Amino acid sequence: MYRKIIRYILWVLLAVSAVIAIWSYAVGFTDKAVDTLLYWAYALAIVGIVATVVIAITISAINNPKSLLKMLVGLAVVAVIVGVAYVLAPGTPAVGYLGAEVPAMTLKLTDTILNLTYFACGAAIIVIIGGVIMDAVRNK
């Protein structure tokens, strides 16, 4: 039963996305059309993230209530990492940029995303190197 409901919801989301994309193409990707596309993408991303977290918490609470604590600790760690990335983000304008003035909040969020990307790349490199070292030690 849930599969049918989810399937119908996904078809509706796909249809709305297609209509917005076709409309944007028809009007020539004006500022309004691009803004509509971006807001729709933001909405889909937020709904997807919220649905994933809510479903994961619900299933975890039903199957194993103790794992709920681990999940909440994981979410807290992610929140701390994002907070650190936000605090470290300078939010300074790009050097040599001559276009329209960019709001300070946009610069701060852009720098936060860059910091999160740097953190993720650094963590990936550390995990790869750590995995190779652990394999070498275990196989010795």
Image (tube, helix red, strand yellow):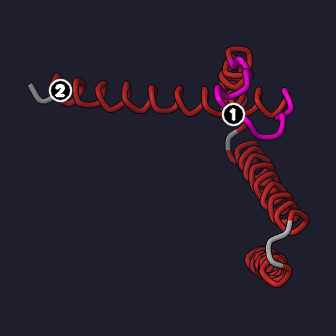
Secondary structure state at the residue bearing disc 1: loop
Three-letter amino acid code of the residue under disc 1? Tyr
The mark found on residue 11 in the picture is none
Dividing the picture into quarters, in which one does residue 92 lie? top right
Q: In the rendered structure, does residue 93 fall within the stretch colored magenta? A: yes
Indicate which disc, 1 or 2, sits on the residue closer to the N terminus.
Answer: 1
> The magenta stretch spans which residues?
89-104
Please give the residue where the numbered disc 1 appears in the rendered image.
Answer: 97
Looking at the rendered structure, the secondary structure element under dot 2 is helix
Depth check, mark 1 against mark 2: the one in front is: 1
Which residue extends farthest right? 32
* Quarter of the figure with the C terminus: top left
Q: Label 2 crowding class (10 Å Cα cut-off): few <14, some 14-19, many 20+? A: few
Relative image position of residue 72 (x, y in whole percent): 73, 29
In the rendering, at what x and y percent does residue 81 appear?
Answer: 65, 22
Q: Are marks 1 and 2 in contact (CB under 8 Å)?
A: no
Tell me: 104 left or right of 83: right
Observer-nearest residue: 90 or 27? 27
Image point 42% across, 33% down: which residue? Answer: 124
Q: Residue at x 77, y 80 (%)?
A: 25
Q: Which residue is denoted by mark 2 in the rendering?
A: 138
Choose top left, top right, bottom left or bottom right for residue 43: bottom right
The location of residue 60, given as percent across then percent down, is 70, 44
Residue occupying image coordinates x 73% and y 52%: 52
Asked if residue 73 is positioned above or below residue 65 in the image, the reply reads above
